[in-house]
Amino acid sequence: MFERTVPTPPEPGLPGRDLPDGLLAARAAEGDEDSFAVLVQRHGRPLLALARCMLGDPQDAEEAVQDAFVSAWRRLPEYRHGAEFRTWMHRITVNRCLTMRRHRPPPLPLDAVAERAAKDAWSQPARSAEQDAATAALSRALDGLDAGQRICWILREVQGLSYKEISHVTRSSEQTVRGRLFRARRSLQEAMSPWR
């Protein structure tokens, strides 16, 4: 069986930078590595941000996105051009993140983790501690949501996807997406009320 390898990122001035995703995907499906490299460059950062929100760990996020692009490269001949490439990549990345979360070992208790060193001796410790606590509270609140609500909230609020795009990524109706977002926002608002 033919083994596909992921191409390297495009060089500056590489042809195809201005082409739409659909055409680049069609060319990549025919084996054009430069076209796929343009797609990787174009969509890599937003997908990495999505994976970081879902997984919390930057290294896990990079691994998830890399795995998603490898999977996309191998499955490009199956890509239906009726869906946007961006939406298709979001679906692959979300699936990879969910798989990684399911197979993740349980977190360590707080007393087992060493204290983080201050970044700067002249930093404002109170402000830094408050910001860290608020971020941790949001992270806990997101973890408290069910997977469907968490994914919908991240795709909408962090990635800026439309309801229609989210419905394609999650394979649910737009009404279901709206309901999940409503419940997620309500839960997060309650969980974050002490930080207002």
Image: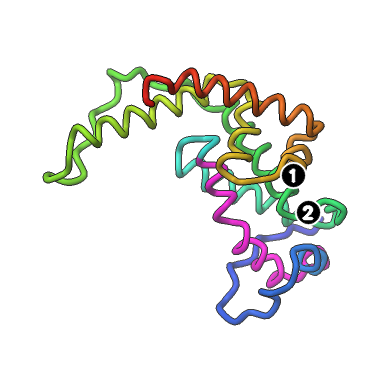
Residue 74 position in % (x across, y down) = 75, 54
| Along the line of sight, the residue nearer the viewer: 61 or 123 | 123
- Of label 1 and label 2, which has the lower sequence position? 2
**What percent of the width, then of the height, locates residue 140?**
45, 23
Instruction: Report whether 110 appears left or right of 142.
Output: left
Give the spatial CA distance, label 1 vs label 2: 9 Å
Residue at screen point 36% across, 29% down = 134
Q: Mark number for residue 165?
A: 1
Q: Is residue 40 magenta?
A: yes
| Vertical placement of residue 155 versus 4, above or below | above
Q: Residue at x 17, y 39 (%)?
A: 124
Mark 2: which secondary structure?
loop
**Residue sitting at x 29%, y 20%:** 112
Residue at 80% x, 68% y is 23
Left or right of 172 on screen, residue 104 = left
What secondary structure predominates along the stretch shown in magenta? helix
CB atoms of marks 1 and 2 within 8 Å: yes
148 or 59: nearer the eye? 148
Query: Looking at the rendered structure, which numbered label has been put on residue 105?
Result: none
Q: Looking at the picture, how far across and down is residue 41, in whole percent?
A: 59, 64
Disc 1 element: helix
The residue lying furthest to the left in this view is: 122
Q: Callout 1: 10 Å neighbours few (<14), some, many (20+)?
A: many
Quadrant where the N terminus is found in the figure:
bottom right
Q: Position of residue 179 (x, y in %)?
A: 71, 24
The three-letter code of the residue at mark 2 reads: Glu
Q: Nearer the viewer, mark 1 or mark 2?
A: 1
Q: Is residue 43 above or below residue 105?
A: below
Q: Which span is picked out in magenta? A: 28-52
The residue indicated by pointer 2 is: 84
